[in-house]
Image: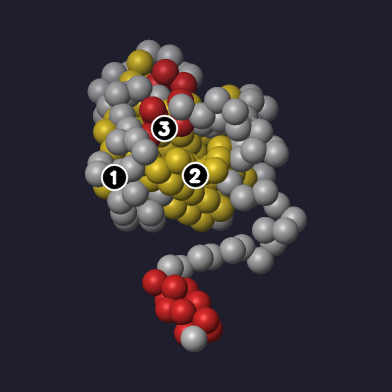
């Protein structure tokens, strides 16, 4: 009867333990959702993390939905930002200035950071519109769609100076301006697929 009780309890709960968990410390998870998450705003969720490190990594898990940002989401080292899929999770904003820097971007990258499984869309409105901006940073960007429109100068992914992000299954596009670049490199990404 003890075995039956254990099976009944196990049937009600799903516990997933990664196979390499003995080698790696599990991440702390912060959730973002319009209902029931730790936060409703992705920027506030990332900003709340103050103790991320190699020994203490975090994941910001963003649920399905369209999240309209009014300021740049600045990634942090040792923090992964994961959506529920490109079609399910979108970070969007009309963030545009006259500067070629993070102040014109929806997301700004960081070293030892990851963004995956979501769409980033900047609808611009000013001179420069950037979806994802990297300045001397090299995040992992995987299974992400990035778009930029609405500015005179539109950049899906803008890699400045010594940035070398690893880009895997990234769809980047820019339209509607005088100058449009899906991916603009003044440095070289490690891998683009």
**What SS does tag 1 mark?**
loop
> Is 50 in front, or is 142?
50
- Label 2 crowd bin: few (<14), some (14–19), many (20+), radius 10 Å: some
Proximity of marks 3 and 1: CB atoms separated by less than 8 Å = no
State whether residue 138 appears in this view: no
Q: Which residue shows up at 54% across the image and 43% down it?
A: 28
**What SS does tag 2 mark?**
strand
Q: Which residue shows up at 29% across the image and 19% down it?
A: 126
Of the residues under marks 2 and 3, which one precedes in the sequence?
2
Q: Can you identify the residue that label 1 sits on?
A: 36
In the image, which is nearer the foreground, mark 3 or mark 1?
1
Q: Can you identify the residue that label 2 sits on?
A: 29
- Label 3 crowd bin: few (<14), some (14–19), many (20+), radius 10 Å: many
Q: Residue 50 appears in which quarter of the rendering?
A: top right
> Is 28 in front, or is 136?
28
> Is 57 in front, or is 16?
16
The dot on residue 26 is none
Compute the Cα span from label 1 to label 2: 14 Å
Compute the Cα span from label 2 to label 3: 10 Å
In the rendered image of this protein, does residue 41 appear above or below residue 98?
Answer: below
The dot on residue 45 is 3
Proximity of marks 1 and 2: CB atoms separated by less than 8 Å = no
In the rendered image of this protein, does residue 63 appear above or below residue 49?
Answer: below
State whether residue 8 appears in this view: yes
Q: Position of residue 39 (x, y in %)?
A: 34, 35
> Is 21 in front, or is 168?
21
């Amino acid at each position: 009867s003890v075995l039956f009780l254990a099976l009944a309890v196990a049937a009600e709960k799903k516990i997933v333990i990664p196979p390499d968990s003995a080698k790696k410390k599990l991440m702390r998870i912060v959730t973002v959702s319009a209902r029931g998450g730790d936060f409703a705003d992705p920027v506030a969720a990332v900003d709340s993390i103050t103790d991320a490190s190699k020994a203490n990594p975090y994941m910001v898990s963003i649920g399905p939905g369209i999240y309209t940002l009014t300021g740049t989401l600045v990634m942090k080292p040792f923090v992964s930002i994961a959506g529920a899929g490109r079609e399910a999770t979108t970070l969007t904003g009309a963030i545009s200035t006259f500067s070629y820097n993070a102040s014109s971007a929806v997301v700004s990258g960081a070293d030892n950071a990851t963004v995956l499984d979501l769409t980033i869309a900047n609808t611009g409105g000013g001179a420069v519109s950037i979806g994802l901006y990297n300045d001397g940073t090299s995040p992992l960007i995987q299974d992400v769609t990035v778009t930029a429109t609405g500015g005179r100068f539109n950049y899906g992914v803008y890699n400045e100076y010594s940035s070398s992000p690893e880009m895997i299954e990234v769809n980047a596009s820019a339209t509607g301006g005088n100058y449009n670049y899906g991916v603009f490199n003044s440095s070289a990404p490690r891998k683009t697929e």
